[in-house]
Image (cartoon, helix red, strand yellow):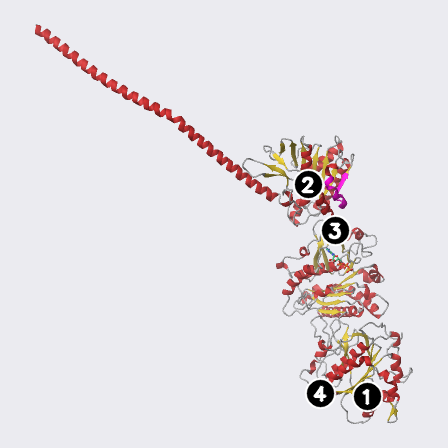
Amino acid sequence: MPDLRTQLVTRVRTMLSHALGASRARLTAARSELGAAQDRLRRTRDAAGRVPARVGAERDQRITDLADRYGDRIAGLADRAAQAAEREAPGAAGADWPGWQPTPVVRGEAPGPLRIGTVRLPDSVPVPALVPLLDAGHVHLSGADRAGCDAVVAALLLRAIGRAAPGAVRLVGYDPEHLGGGLAGFAPLSTAGLLTFVGPGGLARLLDDLVDQIRRINETVLAGEYGSLRELAAATGRRPEPWRVAVLLGGDELSRHERGQLDRVVRTGAACGVHLVVRGIDLPDEPAVHRVVVTADGTRLDSCPGLTVRTDPAPPATLVTETCREVAAQVNAGPPPTPFTDLLPPVDAMWQEDSAHSLVAPIGDGPQGRPVSLTLGDYPPHALIGGPSGTGKTNLIFAWIGSLAARYSPAELEFYLLDFKEGVSFARFAQGRRDPSWLPHMRLVGINVNTDREFGLALLRFLAEELRRRADAAKRHEVTKLAELRAVDPTGRWPRIVAVVDEFQMLLAGRDAVARESADLLEDLARRGRSQGIHLVLASQDVRGIEALWGRPALVAQFTLRIALPKALRILAERNDAAQSLPRHHAVVNAESGMSEGNQVARIPAASDWGTWSDLQHRLWRMRPPDAAPARLFDGDAIPRLEEAPDFVALRPPGDPDGSRATVQLGADGEPDRTAVPDRSEAGPNRSGTGPDRPSGGVRGPVALLGEIIDVQARSAGMRLPRAPGRNLAVLGTGVDEACAVLDAAARSLHRQHRPGTARFSIACLDPDADTAARSLYDALGTDASWYEEEDIGELMAETANGLGHGGTLGQPHYLLLYAVDAAASQLSGTVGGRSGLEHLRHVLHNGPERRTHTLAWWRGVARMRVDLGGPASRTDQIGAWVALDVQGAELTSALYPGPGGGPDWYPRPWRGLFFDRSVHRTGQVIIPYGPSR
Ligand SMILES: Nc1ncnc2c1ncn2[C@@H]1O[C@H](COP(=O)(O)OP(=O)(O)OP(=O)(O)O)[C@@H](O)[C@H]1O
């Protein structure tokens, strides 16, 4: 049994020891686990302790980053805002006061908003704070800082003035508290009507006036075509109305009427350039109202409510007054001219117009900024331009010619231009020494023709001839008008012709043959030219010119286009006095014969100064057709030269290969030229010659050229010397130089038509003053010439007379050139061979021409010649032609000049002669002697 107990005890012991061992092992494991867990806890605690510092650092970093980015962004935005503001408000609209100056908008540019101060953000550039005013709205100022408000008003007004062209901003001030004191610096503007004040109680009137302006602008300027002046300006590039800025600085409570009118202005003004700058009066809440609140803490704009604006200081008082004074001076000096280039089409559109139906070209701007055009065609066909001296007629003619010449090519349009007043401004249309260009449309320019009315007459005759040519062509093609003629004859050259005559009344002055014929031709051209594309433009500075026409109602009635410059009288209809109130550089254009309803006012650009004009002329000149010839320039003050005269250059001896080119116009005045060869000038359409002349020196005899004819083609006056009775020339008068010039040209031209040694030239000079000229001729003629001293003249006449007697064979041509022959009375009284010298002279005059002996003699008076011819009752038919110098027309009585009335209309004038050849002329022909040969 013990064993069992022992066994049992041992088993229990064993079991207990196992249990103890296991418990110990578990304890150890648990302790180790605890240690590990505590270790983890500690580590976790350590880690947790480190997290907030890192996160905080990260957060701080991110906040700093964000702040930096925000700052950069703000600075960038501020930068861009500042740049945009500078673009929006350039120059005078936004510049700082030091160095500030007006910078008026250029054509087509909008005035933009105006700076009143700056917005300043930390670390950023200041951003200009802008307020829209001109063309945009109204500004309402409020706030406790009165001085600050005044500074804003002054800044706005000065910037507005500086941003507009002088005179384009008009201010009205209503300042009942300070009676205008708030705008004192702007006072100089009032001298030019750019600033007016209305006194206390005048507000209603001021507002009424603004409302009227708005209504007028809406009705007549915008006329339903544009929504605002700003739109009109953007579309046309022109601004026909000024900006009107009313500055209302406080006052009493408004009446109902005033309130109503003010509200209307607020609603509708900005579109019409009517703006308000207001302090102390409420304005309704309208989008056009921009509010500015000025307090000592800063200024706020309703357009950027969150930002504080630091307003600019008021502009310095001297800057305000100086600017206003300058603007007023410019306005008082008159409006600046609109640029001439505004009249011209773009370069690629030049010469693209067709003149078949009419010529239309703008001449300037109308009040609404739209171009005002002038038309010449079937209606209106002709124009009258009038205005006192200095009002711009010449300039207007330049502008019109330029505007036309840029649109129509020379094949569509030709000009003929005549200026009766002294001056050379039109000479630039022709080729000059300094400037080789000419206006390709210009065919003829006559300047300094004030004493040469014959030149005007010649132009009219020329145009009449062209009219006849066109009428004939129209008849041949069975049409009546130029447009139809051009349609049926598309290859023909039928440009419209515009003939401009400045100071045309000179042509009609006096009651002589020139005036009579001119008036008749003008009337005919005015009546019939309309349908043949010949248009007359007559300009005159005073009423006399118009009255010269007024006597001919039928003539005046054709001039339905009237252009009146400021203060022009009687150009427009009687009760139409629109020209009286025209500003400088404007014109009333009226295509209704001057009736008021046809009035259009145009502002004319400056076109006549050389720089402006030459740009266009050079451009057109470079475009000219290759065969274009320069315009013929007739300068009444110039002396032509024989060696340059085409008719002289063309002279050849008979039989010369080129002899057939010897051509001289010998037709009677105004008659179709029956003897001349076709017109060598390209200047005109007068190609009326009817066949080549015969070689000079042939059957029809050589030609003595005497001077230049006053005509449109620079032809020479010539006297033909065939073998026929009376073919002698008398030069009459005391003008030594002129007489010498006529004899010189005659002799040299004759000499050119004879081969050396085939003609004799006998020269005798009895006036010492003429000696140099006569000897120079003698030298030029070489061995063909013989010189006779005073004492030999009796001998010369006897020998010549006797030489004629030898019947049968004809001797050589013999030309006697007798200078001051009347001075030879005593020498010629002596007898040679039973006859006195005078009897020999008469015999030579009488019988010489048929024997090829022609006398070209100068007598210093008509009476002296008559004595030499045999006394007052003697015949004069041996003097077939004469040139009268300083001899009155009445002295050239019927013995020398046909018809009743005691001689031609001839009033001597320097370096002119009246040439009459009884074999071809009906009336005398004024010539310009050639200058001394070089
Ligand atoms: N539209 C204009 N704009 C600017 N200047 C002008 C204008 N018209 C004329 N002028 C200037 O005025 C002056 C006189 O003009 P213009 O010679 O054309 O007058 P006019 O009437 O022909 O005078 P006159 O008959 O005495 O010659 C010139 O100096 C000219 O440049």
Instruction: State the extent of the magenta-drawn residues as a range.
Output: 184-197
Give the residue at mark 1: 848
Given this view, does label 3 or label 2 mark the residue nearer the observer?
2
Location of residue 749 in the rendering, given as x and y in whole percent from the top left corner: 74, 81
- Gap in angstroms between the C-alphas marked 4 and 1: 22 Å
Looking at the image, in which quadrant does ligand 1 appear?
bottom right
Say if mark 2 contacts mark 1, CB within 8 Å.
Answer: no
State if disc 2 and disc 3 touch (CB < 8 Å): no
Residue type, mark 4 in image: Pro
Q: Is residue 873 above or below residue 926?
A: below
- Residue where numbered disc 4 is placed: 756
Badge nearest the viewer, 4 or 1:
4
Q: Amino acid at mark 3?
A: Gly
* Mark 3 residue element: loop
Label 4 sits on a secondary structure element that is loop
- Quick check: is the Cβ at mark 2 less than 8 Å away from ligand 1? no
- Residue type (three-letter) at the residue carrying disc 2: Pro
Residue bearing the label numbered 2: 316
> Quick check: 914 above or below 547?
below
- Residue 591, numbered label: none
3 or 4: tag closer to the N-terminus: 3
Residue 444 or residue 783, whichever sits in front: 783
Residue 846 is situated, as x and y percent measured from the top left of the image, at: 84, 87
Percent position (x, y) of residue 791?
Answer: 84, 88
Find residue 334 and name its label: 3
Disc 1 Cβ-to-ligand 1 distance below 8 Å: no
Residue type beneath disc 1? Gly
Task: For marks 2 and 4, give the CA distance.
Answer: 91 Å
Is the magenta region chiefly helix, strand or loop? Answer: helix
In magenta segment, residue 188: yes
The residue located at (72%, 57%) in the rendering is 374
